[in-house]
Amino acid sequence: MATKTTHTFKTVDSIDLKVDIYTRTSDIDNSVKYNTKSPVILFIHGGGFVAFDREHLGPSIIQSALKRSWPLVSTDYRKLPQVRGKELLEDVKDAYSFVREDLPGILAGTEDKLPPFENIIVVGQSAGGYLALLCGHFKDHRPIAILSYYGVTTTSDDMFKRERNPAQPKIPRAYIAHFLDEEASVGSTPPHGAFHPESLLADLSRNPDFIVPASDESHPSRARQLLAAYFAQEKMFASFMEDVDRDLEDPSWRDYVPTIFVHGEADAAVPLQASVNLAKVIGPTPVKLFVAKGANHAFDEPLYLGDPEMAAVEEGWAALEEVVNAKLNESA
């Protein structure tokens, strides 16, 4: 089973930003000890930069991390358009610092300040993949590896320049205008899109008795996702991210961290070519791309390890484990 605890890592403008910490229940029962070399994961959710929160992740993410006894920390971040890319990245940096500096004491059950974790892995999906990739550009205490699930790579990508399909109706500004007047927030996740610890058995396999909550089309996150489509239509994402974006010509990609990409072959939201293009320029570090045949965007979210559609995901995590083990052996 997976055990979840929730902690506030930051308060800004009266907004509490929180993290959910997931550990394997049997590790807690057996008093597993973590040390500064223990791998830990910071997970950054997707949602077009405008929707959902830290609860938005699929069961296979938890399975993949906890089967390796890697604690996983899923973080909130504020959403567009009330803040811009700079603030989103600041939130992720603060969550990263929380994982590095505060998580050791939390996992040890002490309020004492313990030595920081040295081996942080950052995993992100879609918009969260974009923010995960930005973590690889940190000047200090960089992650030892990045795993990007169908992540946005740069707002200079062709996907942000393509013209609207004339067969699709244009989204009027009036449809999204009320969202522009909202207060800043971290978003929210409908129950059917959230991870539920009871969905897994003690051995982290799928609980056959778990019933996924019914889809709630009235949940505010559903309507808010229209913002992402509107911003894409109006080609606004580049301006939102202009302070943080790294295009493929940026030299920092040539001195980057090991990176694993998992991407659906038929992704209609973030085309596979985005990951292909970035994989070609990253260096000299190991880079691997795993393609899920015929899969669309977010194909993995409702699935579990062992499902036939999950082969590329499982291969990606195996490659990630190789990178992590190599790093641990190097520093031993």
Image: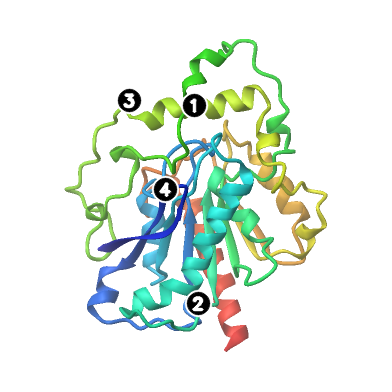
Expressed as whole percent of the image width and height from the top left, the position of residue 48 reads 53, 36
Which sits earlier in the primary sequence, circle 1 or circle 3?
1
Picture quadrant where residue 28 is located = bottom left
Residue holding disc 4: 14
Which sits earlier in the primary sequence, circle 3 or circle 4?
4
Residue at image coords 57%, 23%: 230
Expressed as whole percent of the image width and height from the top left, the position of residue 69 reads 38, 72
CA neighbours of label 2 inside 10 A, class few (<14), some (14 to 19), many (20+): many
CA neighbours of label 1 inside 10 A, class few (<14), some (14 to 19), many (20+): few
The numbered dot on residue 217 is 3
Identify the amino acid type marked 1: Asp
Identify the amino acid type marked 2: Phe
Q: Distance between the residues labelled 3 and 2?
A: 40 Å
Expressed as whole percent of the image width and height from the top left, the position of residue 170 reads 59, 12
CA neighbours of label 4 inside 10 A, class few (<14), some (14 to 19), many (20+): few
Q: Are marks 3 and 2 in contact (CB under 8 Å)?
A: no
Residue at image coords 44%, 51%: 76
Identify the amino acid type marked 3: Glu
Identify the amino acid type marked 4: Ser
Q: Front-most of 327 and 312?
A: 327
Residue holding disc 2: 117
Q: Front-most of 81 and 272?
A: 81
Q: Is residue 261 visible?
A: no
Q: Do the residues labelled 3 and 4 touch (CB within 8 Å)?
A: no
Which sits earlier in the primary sequence, circle 3 or circle 2?
2
The numbered dot on residue 181 is 1
Q: Front-most of 120 and 179?
A: 179
Q: Is mark 3 on a helix, strand or loop?
A: loop
